[in-house]
Amino acid sequence: MKEKLISSRINKALWVIVTLLPLIIIPIKGIPDIFNVAKAPVLVLGTLFILYDLIRLKQIRLEQEIKPLVIYLVLALFASIMAYKPLLAFSGISLTAGRFEGFISILFYAILFYAAKQHMRLNLKNILFFIGVQSIIAAYAVLQFFMFDPLVEYLNYTKGSYATIGNQNFLASWALMMLVIASGFYLKFRKHSYLIFPALFFGALLASNTRGCWLALMVISLASLYFLRFSNVRTSYFKLLASFLIVFFTMNFFSESKIQQRTKTIKSELDINNEWAGSGRALIWKMSYDIVETHPFLGAGPENLKEALKQTKNKRAIQYGVLTGHTVDKAHNDLLHIAAVSGVPALLFYILFIFTLLVKQRKNIFDCSAQSAIALAVLAYLIQSLFNISVIAVAPLFWVLLGLLANKKQQITT
């Protein structure tokens, strides 16, 4: 009885974290960062609460698919110890650097994964509440797209669509996962009222203006065609597609073809021979690879990419700074970033961890179930991460989804 009570507490804590973390901000003028300053304590306190209950259960098991994750964490720990700035590597924050993604945050993500795998349960009430709250963020992003945002005007932030996430690229990675989850939820229950959710998240994804996530959606859309083999979802699938077309044409029309014009730039931005392709990502990838070559085994240390570029006097980074006025602290490719800050061996074990999960769940992925939607959401995040970075507003949801994916018996209860 005690074990069931503790497991239930962990389940509730996980739902609270993934529901509230993207939403919370501190809208007070004068604070340097109204987004992460609020999100970081929620992640820390929530994960520590879960860790305390996991320890009380005394049932932690290192199953086969978890072992590569443990090795990845150990290597990231050594990388943090040997980093240019160890304190920054562990905490993920200093007065002049860091995005709260040091070793401690990576460890917290792993804890969320394990807790979700062992204790998170899907039921209609929790899913509806979760998607409903997230849809508020999506609606906010769409309003920002049409230049209506008194909060941003009050705080003198740059206009754009980033809602409570903090950046349009991060909004896109979050909206992409939510779009897949909400679409799967609608196809599962096929209620017309649930169609509003994927439509809103699709609108938020368009509002983000982020081409990397649009490309990821194209790939996921092609993959989703497989599920048309199940006759019971075909009608709902095409209704879902129709809702996306309505949202696209509506937003494109009222924005004077802004979305359409943005899509036309995708082809030119894929030319990797152009260092400024992908909004300068090609150049960032090259300078990040320079750090991989300099520190192939343990990397520069979590959150130490910026410091490594500075200490090695990287010519590409200097050129980028002169031309843009900005410095680089993330590789804008999650796999490349892991190699740069934690080393190539850490990257290989991270890839092995993800690959092992997907292979172990391959039968459940293709049966048009909750696991199918979760797997597609995970795949969507992984694809867009090749052009994006990991942040605490979005990454916890990804790691929780990984945990749900790893749970073979996951079913939605009413």
Image (cartoon, rainbow, N blue to C red):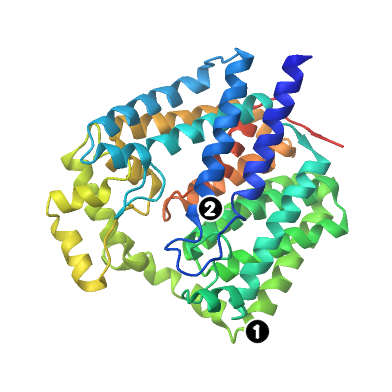
Q: Is residue 19 left or right of residue 170?
A: right
Q: Please identify the quadrant where the N terminus is shown.
A: top right
Q: Residue furthest bottom?
A: 256
Q: Is residue 361 visible?
A: no
Q: Is residue 221 left or right of residue 213?
A: right
* Rendered position, 193 above or below 266: above
- Structural crowding at the residue carrying mark 2, measured as other residues with C-alpha within 10 Å and reported as few (<14), some (14–19) or many (≥20): some
* Rendered position, 383 above or below 361: below
Q: Residue at label 1?
A: 253
Residue drawn at the location 70% of the way across and 22% of the way down: 6
* Rendered position, 4 above or below 287: above
Of badges 1 and 2, nearer the viewer stands: 2
Residue drawn at the location 70% of the way across and 72% of the way down: 247
Residue drawn at the location 42% of the way across and 63% of the way down: 32
The disc at residue 38 is 2
Amino acid identity at mark 1 = Phe
Mark 2, secondary structure of its residue: helix
Percent coordinates x, y for residue 124 in the rendering: 82, 41
Front-most of 68 and 94?
Answer: 94
Amino acid identity at mark 2 = Ala
Front-most of 407 and 54?
Answer: 54
* Rendered position, 110 above or below 177: above
Front-most of 85 and 135?
Answer: 85
Q: How far separated are the C-alphas under marks 1 and 2?
A: 36 Å
Percent coordinates x, y for residue 285 in the rendering: 29, 54
Residue 259's image quarter?
A: bottom right
